[in-house]
Amino acid sequence: MDGTGHLPNGIICTPEQYAISTSSSSIHTTLHCLTRGESIGLTVNILEYINLGASAGIISLVAVAYVWTIIARNVFRLHFKSSTNMERGRIFQEPTDLLMFSLFSADVLQAIGAVMDVKWVHDGRVQIGHFCNAQGIVQQLGETGVAIATLTIAAYTFIGIWLGKGVRSMRITTIVVSITWLFVILMVTLGNTLNRGADKSRFQAPTPYWCWISKDYLQLRIWGEYFWFWITLLFSIVVYVPLYLWSRGNIVFDDDFWWKLHWQCADVNADPSLRGIRRRSLIMLLYPLVYCILILPLSVVRWIGFVQESHGGENRISATSTLAVTALYGLSGACNVILLLTTRPESVLFGKRPYVSVGRAPSLVLSVNRVTLPDSSTDQDGRSKARSRELEEEEVELGRLPSR
């Protein structure tokens, strides 16, 4: 019998490594030997990022890479086909551009962190070391960045519709995005720097299927990442419900006092073009909504695990459950790409068409107040043409930050 004859089927660790992995004093800390089922589960997560037609569906890394190809193409066109230096410097023309650029930057980091699981599948074990530290850092940067970027989009959409005052200032948006990324980078840097030393347990360690913040730092797990998951989830739900009712005509906002609103029955005879414009103004809120759908199962599983660990016990969540909800959450980048491609604004950064110098950047917001309904005396052809013009104008504004 060879040296691995007594190991469980599918384990490719050495007997010594397997003994360390199953030791109660070191599990989740230094090394974890992957079973065959766990390796398959990780492979499913990986395939979502590197194989367009395989496994669970659409792949985030390839999808996000496609968006970055669009960005690179448009930046190239702007730089080499613009006639003035001022135009060349206007890559970000609207707050929407900055917010979406921030979101897809975080999506790239999150996807890279997931693809790094390839090493663990290849080795058959998850082990501490420089690669483990790198994966933990990249995953925290990406996942926390996605959460905060999504939260920012939800907040901007809320301000634009509820308060009726869209944030048009590029300076303010630049400051907001810069502060969020500075906060994420500082939080990750301090966590990995201050919790280092011979007298402290490993900060980044097997958890156990990939590397992330060790279970010995439960508070930093929560405040460094999961708090932002949950605050984004809660805020998005709280914001989406009243804005959806507004789009149906059940809620009317007071133009003088933003905190006042009036309830009414939805008018079934209301002009369909006006209702359509209201619903389209919620386009940007689809990003937080999709994020909520994908993050909710992961949050439930993680919360149960945290409760088990907080009482001094071990996380008893099955590998199947953990890997399934993680695979679902891994689709967030692909879903963001789908939303972008179906509601893409005609901006310099994300637009489909070649850049054309037009002097001034297009309007930032989708304004419901600018709709002009035809007079009752207008003939049918005139009415159709008027609505057609309005809907054409509206289509150009899809995917941008709205306001009332």
Image (tube, rainbow, N blue to C red):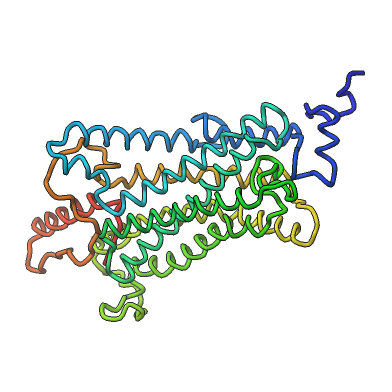
Residue 161: image location, x then y, percent: 32, 66
* Residue name at image x 35 percent, y 74 percent: 251
Q: Is residue 386 left or right of residue 190?
A: left
Q: How many marks?
A: 0
Left or right position of 191 against 314: left
Q: Is residue 99 above or below residue 121?
A: below
Residue situated in front as seen by the camera: 399 or 127 = 127
Q: Which of the 4 image quarters holds residue 248? A: bottom left
Which of these two is toward me, 65 or 345? 65
Q: With respect to residue 272, does 16 lie above or below?
A: above
Q: Quadrant of the N terminus?
A: top right
Location of residue 44 in the rendering, given as x and y in whole percent from the top left corner: 61, 35
Residue at the image position 67 percent from the left and 36 percent from the top: 129
Q: Position of residue 41 (x, y in %)?
A: 66, 36
Q: Quadrant of the C terminus?
A: bottom left
Determine the residue located farthest toward the right in the rendered image.
1
Position of 243 compared to 384: left or right? right
Q: Quadrant of residue 207?
A: top right
